[in-house]
Every structure is written in structure tokens, then in C-alpha cells.
């Protein structure tokens, strides 16, 4: 039996003991996970520094702070989320108990990504634990040091049988995908997402795919261009552009292109100094393979800012490209690096048409003071999320579902959405062996009169208070008795 098979079998056995279903056990595991981030921040930060050149403060700001917030929310709300959820009834079920009961799915596979290795791996794990599942955690092998630290620390703080960590590369992932899971949660690119979905289909396993795409950013000529460009600069160059919801390209009118370039240039200097290479807050490309992939995108575009690079150090300066054509290399795939192309359009109409010609993106950004422009973007485009007059921050709002649509993914998570995504929302209806007269309408022989009664009881929905329900129940009891008597005569 392979190491991967052993991990899955171990998680399955642990789940079958039933201990993960206890709310007390779930809360205890979440508190232990929370303790990991307060007690082991140094090891976490040191590993990410080696992998992506993130500073310790940057690691907390973009990786662990949000996780601590998610854990606190789950602990605080778990009893509410896990409680039976009453639903609306029709007249036929008025005297019955009808509710939705969230229950664990079973064993979940979580395949993390390398760009935010803790945030996008542990966030779904929080949901899996809260929902009462077991989970096999597969961190990205691309973040070598972080993967090793995750493998070392998670078993110390949380149940190592219920939540085993499996490290390794493509062969190990492929072996995991040959096993049967009750849900697969993958964060990464659409090409691998298709392979994940294909493997899951063999076991009819549901999937959550958090992918990416080319997230557009439309800058209206009437907005405060200085503020807009400052926020776009932050959104684009955070983590050296290796963010799935980073603005992938700018759309603006030709009349403001020069101003946009100048304002981004000022912001780059403000954030990362005259020499970003020596700035502790500017990251690095994850490896040389991705360095070469990104540099190849520059071939047929005009560099307006940046372009400096050092392959041995996996460094690419914050770079802006101007007058970019729609068929340029940089527009053929998600950039996932510090290149920001600017394409000029005649106005909002052309921008919307351009956006709609491509695959549906994970995020869409619009900068404008005009509510009508925002409304048109909301109404006439489709994306995983839409943010007006800022970048990235919708990811931090736990009350908003985070996920893609179409090519940018399926399913969503964060807060209660994580809990629901990794739960089976079981339909429950509990009747009593009384009021049998009402059921006479469904029993053969079928007659027009019985159909009339059925239409009344099934199609009529009511929203009554407690007193109203009691009164209606009394009436229904009388009706049932009368119906029963009529059918028995």
C-alpha cells in the first residue's frame, strides 16, 4: 500500500469512529489550529521568506491574519451553522417537522497552491474541520520550505489521523487522485483543474475548483486616477503579481494612458523605492521555470516602466506595458507575475465587449465615481467577484462567497460558505402516524375531486405566525376528519 493510500485509509478509519462529528471536537481542533499561528509564526515566516521572499509582516498580513479571523468566526458561529435549519412548509406538511440538517461529507482532499501556501490550503481545511469531515492535506510541492514546515507542524497541533499531510509532487498527487474521496478542493490553474475534475468523475466525487484567469481592470477617465492607480499598483504587485485575483490588465481610453503610466510609476516608487530589488516588501518569482514563462510574454509589447530582471535571483521588476494589442503574447494566458499590460478602448461599451469576449474571470475591477458605470459592469458582465474602486479586498470579507465561474472555477468558500460547501445539506421531514384522512387524496382510485384537494394543499404556501399555525392546524384536523368520513362512507 502506497503512502498516499495509507493516508486516505487512515483518515477514513478515523472518520468512521465518529469523533470528528462532535462539535466539541471540531472546536478543539480549530482552537489548536489557531494556536499554531500564534506559537509558530517564526517558522512559518522563515519558510515563506525562502520560498517567495515575503517579509515576516507581509506573511502575517497576507497569509495568517486572515486565517486567524476565519478560525475565530468558525468557532464563534459553529453551533449556529451546524444546527438544523427550519424551512417553509406547504399546507400538506404544516403539522410535520421539516428541516435541513448539515452533516459531514466524509473524507475531503485539499490540494493547495504555492502563491499563498498557508492561506489557500488552510482556509478550506478550516471549513472541512468545522463541517465535521476528515481531510487529507496536500500542500504544493513548489513551495518546498513551506510544504516541509506544514508537514511538520500540522500533526503536532491537530488530529494527525483525521487530517494527515501528504507531501510530494505530481506522482504523489496523481496517486491521491486515484483514491476515492467524498469531496476534492483544488486551488490552482484551469489546466490542472480539468485533470482534477476528470479524476474525480471516476468516483462521482464533487469538486470545488478555485482557479484564476485574466482579471480585467477598467479605469474610467472621470475617476481620481491618482487614487485608482495607487490601488491598482498595490493589487498588481503584491506577492510579485502572483495572486489569482490580481488585476491582469488595464482597459482605459487613450486620453488617460500616459497619466495612468505616470501614476503607477509614482506608486511603485512609493511602495518599493527606486530599487525594488533591494526592497524587503517586494517578492520574487517562485522559480526559474515561471521566471522564463513570464519573461517570454514581453517579446511583442512595449515596456513603459520596469523590465529589469535577474534570472539567478528570480527577480522581475514591477513592469508596465503600454499600447498592448489584444493578440500580444501577454494577453494569451493569465500572467501570474509583475507585468501589467494597458490596452486602450474607446469607452465603457468597448471595454464591456472586450471583457465578454474572453473567459469569465475570477475577479473584475472597475474604477469610477459613476454608479451607472458600476451598474453596467455588474449587469452586463460575468465574473467570480466584482469590486469597484479597489483591488483584492473582497477576498477578506467572510460574508462574501469567494469562487469563480466558468473557466475561473466552480464552488465557493470563506466563512459559512466554506462550511456549507463541505457539508451535505440533508433534507429531513418527520411526520406522525395521524391525520390519515388528509392522505386519502393521494391514494387510488384517483379522481378529479382528489386532484382538486391535492392542488389546494400542495400549491398553497402560507407564512403564518405561531397563533395562525395553531388555528390552521385545528381547521386541518376538522377537514381531515370530514374528508376521512366522506371517503369511508
Image (tube, helix red, strand yellow):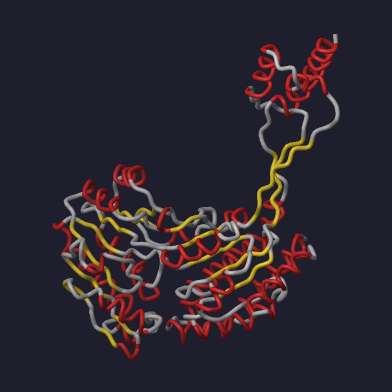
**Furthest residue in direction bottom, as rendered:** 312
Q: Position of residue 58 (x, y in %)?
A: 46, 77
Viewer-closest of 131 and 449 = 449
Q: Report whether 349 appears left or right of 408.
A: left
Q: Position of residue 347 (x, y in %)?
A: 19, 49
Q: Position of residue 185 (x, y in %)?
A: 55, 63
Q: Report whether 150 appears left or right of 351.
A: right
Residue sitting at 37 percent across and 82 percent down?
A: 284
Which quadrant holds the C terminus? top right
- How many marks do you count on the picture? 0
Q: Is residue 324 above or below residue 117?
A: above
Q: Is residue 397 above or below residue 62?
A: above
Viewer-closest of 315 and 194 = 194
Residue sitting at 33 percent across and 66 percent down?
A: 334
Which image quarter: residue 463?
A: top right
Which quadrant holds the N terminus? bottom right
Viewer-closest of 260 and 176 = 176
Q: Report whether 23 appears left or right of 66.
A: right
Q: Is residue 371 above or below residue 359?
A: above
Viewer-closest of 333 and 59 = 333
Q: Report whether 346 appears left or right of 264.
A: left
Residue sitting at 64 percent across and 80 percent down?
A: 3
Q: Position of residue 93 (x, y in %)?
A: 73, 29
Amino acid at each position: 500500500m502506497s503512502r498516499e493510500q495509507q493516508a486516505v485509509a487512515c483518515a477514513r478509519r478515523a472518520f468512521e469512529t465518529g469523533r470528528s462529528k462532535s462539535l466539541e471536537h471540531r472546536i478543539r481542533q480549530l482552537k489548536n489550529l489557531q494556536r499554531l499561528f500564534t506559537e509558530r509564526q517564526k517558522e512559518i515566516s522563515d519558510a515563506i521568506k525562502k520560498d517567495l521572499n515575503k517579509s515576516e509582516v507581509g506573511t502575517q498580513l497576507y497569509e495568517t491574519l486572515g486565517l486567524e479571523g476565519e478560525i475565530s468566526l468558525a468557532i464563534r458561529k459553529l453551533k449556529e451553522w451546524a444546527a438544523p435549519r427550519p424551512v417553509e412548509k406547504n399546507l400538506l406538511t404544516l403539522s410535520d417537522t421539516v428541516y435541513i440538517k448539515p452533516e459531514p461529507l466524509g473524507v475531503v482532499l485539499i490540494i493547495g497552491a504555492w502563491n499563498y501556501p498557508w492561506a489557500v490550503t488552510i482556509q478550506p481545511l478550516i471549513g472541512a474541520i468545522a463541517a465535521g469531515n476528515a481531510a487529507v492535506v496536500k500542500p504544493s510541492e513548489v513551495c518546498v520550505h513551506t510544504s516541509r514546515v506544514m508537514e511538520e507542524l500540522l500533526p503536532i497541533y491537530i488530529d494527525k489521523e483525521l487530517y494527515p499531510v501528504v507531501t510530494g509532487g505530481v506522482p504523489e498527487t496523481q496517486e491521491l487522485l486515484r483514491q476515492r474521496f467524498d469531496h476534492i478542493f483544488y486551488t490552482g490553474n484551469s489546466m490542472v483543474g480539468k485533470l482534477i475534475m476528470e479524476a474525480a468523475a471516476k468516483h462521482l466525487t464533487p469538486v470545488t475548483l478555485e482557479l484564476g484567469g485574466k482579471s480585467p481592470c477598467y479605469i474610467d477617465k472621470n475617476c481620481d486616477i491618482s487614487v485608482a492607480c495607487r490601488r491598482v499598483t498595490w493589487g498588481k504587485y503584491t506577492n510579485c503579481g502572483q495572486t489569482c485575483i490580481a488585476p491582469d490588465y488595464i482597459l482605459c481610453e487613450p486620453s488617460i494612458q500616459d497619466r495612468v503610466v505616470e501614476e503607477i510609476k509614482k506608486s511603485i516608487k512609493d511602495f518599493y523605492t527606486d530599487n525594488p530589488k533591494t526592497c524587503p516588501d517586494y517578492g520574487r518569482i517562485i522559480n526559474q521555470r515561471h521566471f522564463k514563462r513570464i519573461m517570454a510574454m514581453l517579446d511583442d509589447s512595449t515596456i513603459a516602466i520596469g523590465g529589469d530582471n535577474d534570472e539567478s535571483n528570480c527577480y522581475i521588476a514591477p513592469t508596465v506595458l503600454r499600447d498592448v494589442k489584444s493578440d500580444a503574447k501577454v494577453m494569451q494566458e493569465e500572467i501570474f507575475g509583475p507585468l501589467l499590460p494597458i490596452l486602450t478602448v474607446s469607452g465603457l461599451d468597448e471595454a464591456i465587449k472586450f471583457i465578454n469576449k474572453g473567459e469569465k474571470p475570477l475577479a473584475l475591477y472597475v474604477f469610477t465615481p459613476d454608479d451607472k458605470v458600476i451598474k453596467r459592469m455588474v449587469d452586463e458582465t460575468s465574473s467570480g467577484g466584482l469590486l469597484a474602486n479597489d483591488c483584492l479586498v473582497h477576498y477578506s470579507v467572510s460574508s462574501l462567497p469567494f469562487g469563480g465561474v466558468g473557466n475561473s472555477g466552480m464552488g465557493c468558500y470563506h466563512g459559512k460558505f466554506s462550511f456549507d460547501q463541505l457539508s451535505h445539506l440533508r433534507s429531513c421531514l418527520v411526520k406522525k402516524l395521524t391525520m390519515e384522512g388528509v392522505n386519502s387524496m393521494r391514494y387510488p382510485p384517483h379522481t378529479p375531486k382528489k386532484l382538486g384537494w391535492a392542488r389546494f394543499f400542495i400549491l398553497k404556501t402560507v407564512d403564518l405566525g405561531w397563533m395562525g399555525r395553531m388555528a390552521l392546524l385545528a381547521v386541518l384536523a376538522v377537514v381531515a376528519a370530514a374528508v376521512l368520513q366522506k371517503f369511508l362512507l
